[in-house]
Image (tube, rainbow, N blue to C red):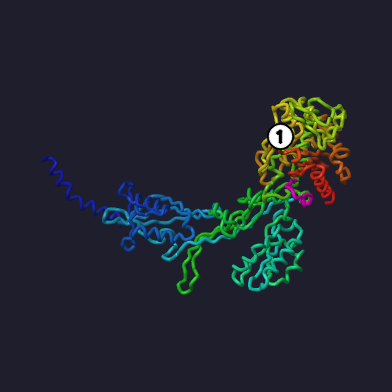
Amino acid sequence: MLLSYPVHRLLSPRRPVLAAVTAAALAAGGLAGCSGEDGPERSVDAFLKGWRSGDLQAVGFVEPTGGRVPAAEVSKQIKALSGELAATPPELKRTGDIPITADVATARVQVSWPLPGGTRWAYETRVRLKHGDDDQWQVIWEPKVVQEQLEDGDRLALRRDRATRAGVLDNAGTPLVAPRPVVRVGVQPNQVKDVKALSRQLDAAFKAIRPALVPAVDLTDLPKRLAEAEPGALVEVVTLRDEAYRQIKPRIYDLPGTKFQADKLDLAPTREFARALLGTVDPAQADDLKAHPDRYVAGDLVGHGGLQARYDDRLRGAPGLTVLSQRSKPDEPGVTTGAELFHSEPKPGQPVKTTLDLATQNAADAALRGEARRSALVAVRVSDGAVLAAANGPGPAGENLAFTAQVPPGSTFKMVSALALLDRGAVTPETTVRCPKTFEVDGRSFKNSDNFALGDVPFRTDFAKSCNTAFTALAPKLGPDGLAQAGRALGLESEWDLGVDVFTGKVSANGSPTEQAAAAIGQGTTVVSPLAMAGATAAVARGHWEQPKLLLDPAPTKPAPAGAALKADSVAALKTMMRAVVTSGTASALKDVPGQPVYGKTGTAEYDNNPAHTHAWFVGWQGDVAFAVFVEQGGSSTASAVPIAERFLRGLAAR
């Protein structure tokens, strides 16, 4: 005790000296705040966390003059200042040390606001804190904490400058979807005396337009829409391509109340042009805005379906964005002033280049025009596998049957069966193969179309006339999986990297004798798409399989490797037989088509247990163009698929 007392007496007089030294150091320029529990770091971090969450109850606030500010009031002000950015709070990060001068600490904070389209607005702000009498660090609240130029009454606003949307290009680099002239047809309610008469006249005029130019226009709700609209408003009825409008302009231009506005929209060459494959470009819909509030705003153009949707981010580019501080002018209601705080230039979209050929696609669309049943026609260039056309007949919008249908191929699959039989040496074109009216396998009877019989004929005749019973009798010679092996050699069932959805087929294998017999004529569990069959047909024409390709830029990164060379003797024999289908067989309607020789195979495919329910097919090639035609519930191929093929080939010849 005696020893400690003098020590205590010696230390005590030094305390004022230390305090004076500390005060002098702070006054001279400040000290870095320590990171202990009593430092300002904890209060800054709590503030940044509360800024993002909206809950600041864990933080104390004071005004620059020293008065206390409720945390709820600060939350309210931050939300108001954030304005149009309030729904997407920024990322916040404290950086560096926190210097302290007297009883005030100043923290540097990196702010990063996420803006639409992946753009970020990044800047640094400063948060000041005051050391209070309660030994706690309190945030000095002022609007410039959010951004240094903000003041009371300001709010952040976002202005978007739409980027130029790029086009989908054809194989020559020409935009397929480009701005094209349209006319918006509308009606002004207070200029119409007889709404029913006007509706009848408009309906008759719209029905006179060629179907290829405009879909059916429903006017049943026009009287109601006119009654509910403001008298001087413009009620839009339909938007017509300019060529469609010119067809009926004399009939509608002088009708009472009709108004017309010229405009341009991003459209394909025709309304039907590869519609399901390309998709459409439309103003953002409610579903788009709800699903992607950070990407789209009202008025944005959005790709729907097909390539326009798949590559929407690439095609639309990134909008230019400007962040503004806005303040209402008290003497001018509705008028705001403000300063620009951030700006990014629009980034134009990048085009998507395809292999589509304008003339071939037009010929394919024209061939399907007027077909009332769901249908598809796809064309592939033999020399390199480029998809030249993908046309789809009537059906649900965006349904690309040409690429994604999963349907039995019917007798077109005899092309695959014949190749397998030729490869195995089971037959030659001259081998006699009997063609009876019916042939039974394990109790199931197979028959020919219209119950025809050929008797004992060369195999080439069985093929040309599409004799089912001959092929079902030969099915055992294929073995359990011989048909599947031949299909894979022609690209069926393989994994393609096409850049869009595609079904490459599923070939029956290891089935019962009945299933094997059915598979030999394209029935049973075998299913394909038109593109898969067009690719297989092109493989026969060139002598080996190559994956069809659709996109040149961006090119798929993992296309399937090319197949091995097919047996030359087998391919030569098969080509001879496919030519006979046209010269003397089931597709003889094509034998006088102008141009190079046509090769092909017809097909009628049962799709349920009713023999009367059949799809219709034709696959073939002429010159460097291989193609497949499919008609759902088309009945006899000679009555539906073959005429479509003829229109297509004649359209190509006339280009």
For the N terminus, the quadrant is top left
Vertical relation: 460 (above or below) 185: above
Q: Name the amino acid, label 1.
A: Thr
Vertical relation: 365 (above or below) 262: above
Q: Is residue 301 magenta?
A: no
Residue 477 percent coordinates (x, y): 77, 25
Residue 340 percent coordinates (x, y): 51, 63
Q: Along the line of sight, which residue is nearer the eye, 129 or 234? A: 234
Q: Along the line of sight, which residue is nearer the eye, 552 or 305? A: 305
**Residue 572 visible, this angle:** no
Q: Which residue of the protein is positioned furthest toward the left in this rendering?
A: 2
Residue 236 percent coordinates (x, y): 65, 65
Q: Is residue 369 magenta?
A: yes
Q: Residue at x 73, y 62 (%)?
A: 206
Q: Along the line of sight, which residue is nearer the eye, 161 or 577? A: 577
**Residue 244 visible, this angle:** yes
The residue at which mark 1 appears reads as: 526
Q: Along the line of sight, which residue is nearer the eye, 404 or 86? A: 404
Q: Alpha-carbon neighbours of circle 1 within 10 Å: few (<14), some, or many (≥20)?
A: many
Report the number of numbered marks. 1
Q: Which residues are magenta?
A: 365-376
